[in-house]
Image (cartoon, rainbow, N blue to C red):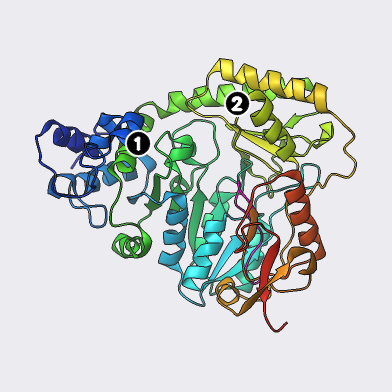
Amino acid sequence: MKLSQERAPLLEALQKFQSMRIVPFDVPGHKRGRGNPELVGFLGEKCLSADVNSMKPLDNLCHPVSVISEAEALCASAFGANHAFFMVGGTTSAVQAMIMSVCKKGDKIIMPRNVHKSAINALILCGAVPVYVNPGIDKKLGISLGMSLKNVEAAIKANPGAKAVFVNNPTYYGICSDIKSIIELAHKNGMLVLADEAHGTHFYFGAGLPPAAMLSGADMAAVSMHKSGGSLTQSSVLLTGKSVDESYVRQIINLTQTTSGSYLLMSSLDISRRNLALRGKEIFAAVIRMAEYLRCEINEIGGYYAFSKELINGGDICGFDTTKLSVHTLDIGLAGIEVYDILRDEYDIQIEFGDIGNILAYVSIGDRKLDAERLIAALSEIKRRYKRDKSGLLTSEYIEPKVAMPPQEAFYAEKAPLPIAESSGKICGESVMCYPPGIPIIAPGEIITNEIVEYIMYAKEKGCFMTGTQDSSIEKINVLKGQ
């Protein structure tokens, strides 16, 4: 059957359903909004009328055979994949399904340590053992980079039985590894390649951007359509290649994904896929122009450094996502999180995140020139009002882990809470991270060091949103008993 990217099968089915006079004696209980007028007042009748349950005319996400299946097939074709799965638990669930489809308890998987927490949590769930490849570090910017091909090759040689290589494409800051060469190397050694493309939807549709994973021969990729693709928050896509058994992947997805898939989220994937397939090149050309304009203007202010392709070195930086507006702030004497807070609290500008030394403003298909000018003006004024000496500021975002045991073993071991300030030298039984970006500072099974304690205390002091510990105040951390 010839697939037409002008179609949106799930949207069409929902529109047909809305035109019918169906009497709802099923869930959800709000009954197209009639039972919850306050919710209708907030979201609108049209939205509530599409918040429906699985039924024959609308298919079923757990085992699609009609309109959802057609929509997924169109999505796979648009992305150049063999199969696409609509995910309603975000890219977190897609990353976890990807890893759990390939790895079982005791299996090794090669991955960079600067992965999102969803990858670490997948190891806790399935019992796989990580072989960490430390990313490169840019000492000036204090950020972690990509994996060098040389380091990946060394990890493969040292662990010939590993099941897969996991790659960030790109990192939160827009840094890309040499994914094509990594794929070729892994396949030559009988390993699959899994890509976290939470921030890489546009790679498949824009021109002049780094290579997309599936178009480069990867076996699986988790893609956040809701980030740069325009769909609703929490909607994502898991892509698979010919080397992967899609029926088994569906089984793995159904272990954890809801049986009540949201038609609001799924239809947003269908609509957004059609939009990108038909207009993606034009859309992302405009996004790149906007990001380049912002980058040039911010660098003209002085003191800030909005970095880009000049970082590419052919080793641990083989590509840069020019839609990313990553800005180094330490030269004006402010941590990234401080600039983040000032922008929000004093200028009503909400950027994506701020960390120890950088901020990230997410530029996308919905941004306007007027908004760009506001951001430029605000950053200029912040420099004028708040610039100070940068001595005493921490600079490094990445601390090399000391792994003592697999994440699953540590997470389920007997643990006891200990004040973070007293935890150095202990084996950690949980994760601690700043969110966003959600990359663990320390993960289960790793040894807590003085440097890690200092980083956590500093990040808290600067106002980073910390998460991961059982103690919601982030005063104590669970460590393994009997050390």
Q: Quadrant of residue 50?
A: top left
User: Which mark is drawn over residue 291?
Assistant: 2
The image shows residue 327, relative to residue 434, as above or below, that is above
Q: Which mark is residue 72?
A: none
Q: Position of residue 157 (x, y in %)?
A: 62, 70
Give whichever of 179, 44 is nearer the camera.
44
The quarter of the image holding the N terminus is top left
Nearest the viewer among 458 and 186 is 458
Give the alpha-carbon distance from disc 1 to disc 2, as whole Å: 23 Å
User: Could you tell me which quadrant the C terminus lies in?
Assistant: bottom right
Would residue 116 appear left or right of 6 to someone viewing this image?
Answer: right
Is 444 inside the magenta-drawn segment?
yes
Which numbered disc flags the more N-terminal residue, 1 or 2?
1
Q: Is residue 442 magenta?
A: yes
Using the rendered image of the protein, determine whether residue 432 is visible from the camera's viewpoint.
Answer: yes
Q: Is residue 297 left or right of residue 211?
A: right
Question: Callout 1: 10 Å neighbours few (<14), some, many (20+)?
Answer: many
Where residue 133 appears, as percent x and y from the top left, is 66, 62
The span shown in magenta is 434-445
Badge 2 amino acid:
Ala
Residue at (35% x, 60% y) in the render: 253
Q: Determine the secondary structure under disc 1.
A: helix
Residue marked by disc 1: 273
Q: The residue tagged with tag 2: helix, strand or loop? A: helix
Q: Is residue 52 left or right of residue 351?
A: left
Q: Going 61% across and 27% down the picture, which residue do you hit?
A: 349
Kind of residue at disc 1: Arg
Residue 224 in the image: x percent, y percent? 45, 44
Main SS, magenta region, reads: loop
